[in-house]
Image: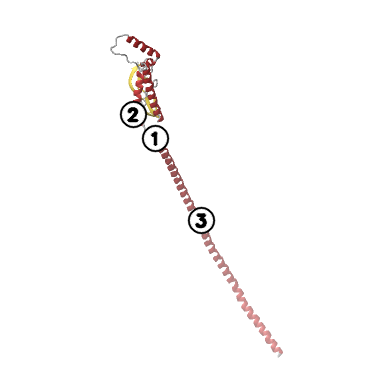
Amino acid sequence: MSFAASASRSIRSCTAAISTRSLTRPVAARCPARLSRLGVRCYSEAKAPSEDTKQAEEGTSTEPKTETSEMEAKLKTKEAEVTDLTGRLRYLQADFLNLQRNAAREKEQTRDFAITKFAGDLLETVDVLTIALKSVPPQALSKQTEHALQAASSSSSDLPQSSAPVHLPKDHAAYLQELHTGVEMTQRLLLQTLFKYHVKPFDPTGDVFDPNHHEALYQAPVPGKEPGTVIDCQKIGYKIKDRVLRAAQVGVAQDTS
């Protein structure tokens, strides 16, 4: 019994070994094919994602460039708008300042030349007073004229008179002197009043004739005078600041050739 048991054991072990070898060989034979297939699959599958990744990376890299270019274009547009608006603002500011200056100048001129008509009407009065002063020569105001008048009055007293002489507290020369002084003071006060409003006279005698400031009444050939020179002033001119209120009435030297 022991022999038979040992024999059966050995037979079983041999069949088990044979079955194990037969089973392990096909598995080992099939493994390389599977491994090769897996390797090929892994390689092909790894290649496709790499292309997609490159395309994705290119897409993502182009998108920031596009956005940057768009932002730069918008920034340039905004800078151009800011430059344009700044230029317009400066022009408007300059126009406003010019408008302020012109308004202030017009206001000042309106204030300065508001009495133009009034001053022009007063000039005739000044002219009349000037003529009245010129009508009395300086010799008539001297002491010699007074003595001459006294001598004339004494000589006339020798003649028969129809009426009694009128005795005056002052002689004729004193009255004439007082009259001249009063007219002169009136003229001076009028001129001072005109000076307050920037009305000033000017006498162009000896100057070159200027049609903007002078009014020619006549021409006369005068030896030694250049043609076009003012030789006589009939009426002096007046100005309000730099504006001519009345042109001077003058005589002009004529060309003798």
Of 100 and 147, which appears nearest the observer? 147
Q: Is residue 109 above or below residue 34?
A: above
Q: Residue furthest left?
A: 162
Question: What residue is rendered at 53% in x and 61% in y?
Answer: 53
Q: Is residue 57 above or below residue 232?
A: below
Mark 3 is surrounded, within 10 Å at the Cα level, by few (under 14), some (14 to 19) or many (20 or more) other residues, namely few
The amino acid type of the residue labelled 1 equals Arg
Q: Secondary structure at mark 3?
A: helix
User: x, y percentage for residue 90?
Assistant: 45, 43
Provide the residue designation for mark 3.
64
User: In the rendered image, which quarter contains the C terminus?
Assistant: top left
**Where's residue 161, x and y in %?**
29, 11
Looking at the rendered image, the quarter that the N terminus falls into is bottom right
Secondary structure state at the residue bearing disc 1: helix
> Label 1 neighbourhood size at 10 Å, few (<14), some (14-19), many (20+)?
few
Q: Is residue 96 left or right of residue 218?
A: right
Where, by quadrant of the figure, is residue 42 drawn?
bottom right
Q: Which residue is mark 2?
A: 121
The Cα–Cα distance between marks 3 and 1, rounded to whole angstroms, is 69 Å
Q: Earlier in the sequence, mark 2 or mark 1?
A: 1
Q: Residues within 10 Å of mark 2 (few under 14, many from 20)?
A: few
Query: Would you say 2 lies left or right of 82 here?
Result: right
Can you tell which mark lies on residue 111? 1
Which quadrant would residue 136 be assigned to in this image?
top left
Q: Separation of disc 2 and disc 1 at Cα?
A: 18 Å
Give the number of the mark in front: 2 or 3: 2
Q: Secondary structure at mark 2?
A: helix
> In the depicted view, which residue is nearer to us: 30 or 137?
137
Mark with earlier residue (3, 1): 3
